[in-house]
Amino acid sequence: MMKRGCIFVCLQICICWGLLWGASTGNNFQLSLAEVFGEGMVLQQEDINNIWGIGRPFAIVQVEFQDQKVKTEVKPDGRWMLSLKNLAAGGPYRLKVTSENESVLLSEVYVGEVWLATGQSNMERKLFMSENGEAVVRSANNQNIHFLIVPQVYYKGHNVNKEMKWQTATAPQVANMSAIGYYFACKLQKELNVPIGIICCYRGGTPAEAWVKEETLERDDKLRPILDNYRKVAIMDDTLYEKKMEEYKVLYRVYNDSVTMGYKNVVRPFEPVGPKHHKRPCGLYHTMLQRIIPYTAKGVIWYQGEGNAERAEQYRVLFPALIRQWRTDFHQPDLPFYFVQLSNFDHPFWQDRPNWAELRDAQLFTWKTVKNTAMVVSIDKGEKNDVHPIYKKPIGERLASCALHLQYDKKVPYSGPVYKSMQIKDNKAEISFDFVYSGLTALGGELKGFSICGADYNFVSARAEIRDGKVFVWSDVVERPIAVRYGWSNWTEANLFNKEGFPATPFRTDNFSLMTEGIYYPMKIR
């Protein structure tokens, strides 16, 4: 009980810190804007923009912007928030905040389209580290793309640069911007011709539960074990935690080298966790995400899932819960959420266990069941031996195609073929798809990536061909097929596309039990 109580105290400290909205007050109620606001920022056009900060309790704060003057009274705790509505695109404009004899002036504020770029390492991957990245950085000169990077603070007191500032996506500073976020912004800016703002909030290696608050996990039977396990195993003593972490790093290097060399029976060491660990449940929600809530955005682009691959069945609940919570927190119940399905990777840890295939299936499930979402398939842009493929431009542009079609009414293709239905005819499976557009094609020749099974549930490699806008699948060793799977492995040679150049999403026609069923907390972290 003592241990659990200490953990709750730490969590509450994080929550209280987050509620300061990025402004440290103590007894200082000097008029200020929250740290997410600054010179060069972009506000969302034609929407309700939340503006907030700190002031003297009960004083009147006025914000002037474009032709609007909006007032509000400061709350007893020193916080204030108000809204600007229906802003016209363009800039730079002046934003002035006044209260009694104090004022804050921003002289360079833009209005256009704002998107949050979030997730883990593949979203975090910097522009200069992507394909041809250094050359792209040198030539970057679009003054109408602005970005802000939320500092990666793991806990209160974490000794890192906590300053947030808006920057233009030009050389040299654009080198450190999310590559996917940059290419996404470039395509939007070219098509829409308005300022684009990208708020970058990500951290490599993080599971989805790091980005939600405690209530989201507590209220669901499949998510509560994440918190229960953390409370059971967290190391609360900082000195002991740091010692165990150093021991883990040594053991993990040995383990990683063994796996890379092909050894299959080595045991992965347990990773210690505690209140300073960036993977802990709900941690980065309070120390990073909450610092930008509720900044108004047009939508979210998200690339994450690697950190939850051992719990793919749970992700079918966790990911939709995260989306619902973010929509509530940002005061935008229909906030668009566009995400990237896990790429192709011959994962040495999972070996022949199809963890990534099951996680991709959970992502597809989210797209199909959660409104105002879309999914980008990246199966064709992976690297067999690198979890961080360099091909970020096509992923960013595919995400932009989703936004252009679904949010900006541009009639552009935005998805590859998606499984629709199956019929069995003459011992062949006839597969129909949505998003066929002008037709199906096999990239590089013979169609690959399909498997089929009969009543024994034993999937075998299958032959497949495209005919009349459908795919026919069969195997000579399966007389009465009952199910088909496509791209069902961590690394796959699946090559079905539509003629518009979008890859088909991996899929399964069955609802058989999955390997990850019933795994409800991180098995690698004990």
Image: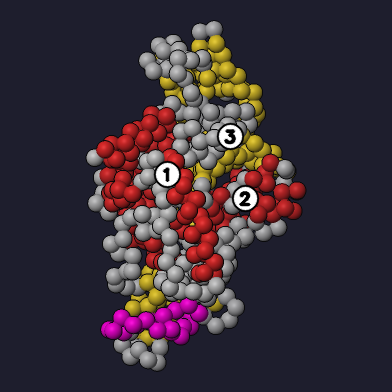
| Residue highlighted by disc 3 | 161
Query: Nearer the observer, disc 1 or disc 2?
Result: 1
Q: Could you give the CA–CA distance between mark 3 and mark 2, rounded to whole angstroms? A: 18 Å
Tell whether position 460 is magenta: yes
What colouring style does the render use?
secondary structure
Q: Measured along the vertical axis of the image, is residue 122 above or below residue 424?
A: above
Q: Position of residue 324 (x, y in %)?
A: 35, 45
How many numbered marks appear?
3
Residue 421 vertical position relative to residue 191 in the rendered view, above or below: below
Q: CA distance from mark 1 to mark 3?
A: 26 Å
Name the front one of labels 1 and 3.
Answer: 1
Question: Which range is magenta?
Answer: 448-467
Residue at 58% x, 81% y: name it: 445
Mark on residue 338?
none
Residue 308 visible in rendering? no
Q: Does the CB distance between marks 3 and 2 fall below 8 Å?
A: no
Local crowd size for mark 3, using a 10 Å CA cut-off: few (<14), some (14–19), many (≥20):
few
Residue 290, quarter of picture: top left
Answer left or right for 243 relative to 200. Answer: left
Nearer-the-camera pick, 56 or 464: 56
The answer for how far apart the CA atoms under marks 1 and 2 are is 34 Å
Kind of residue indicated by mark 3: Asn
> Is residue 156 positioned above or below 69 on the image?
below
Residue 101 in percent (x, y) is at 54, 7
Q: Residue 80's spot in the image, x, y percent? A: 43, 20
Which residue corresponds to mark 1?
A: 240
Is residue 108 among the parts visible in the rendering?
Answer: yes
Residue at the image point whose x is 68% and y is 46% from the top: 175
- Which comes before the other along the chain, label 1 or label 3? 3
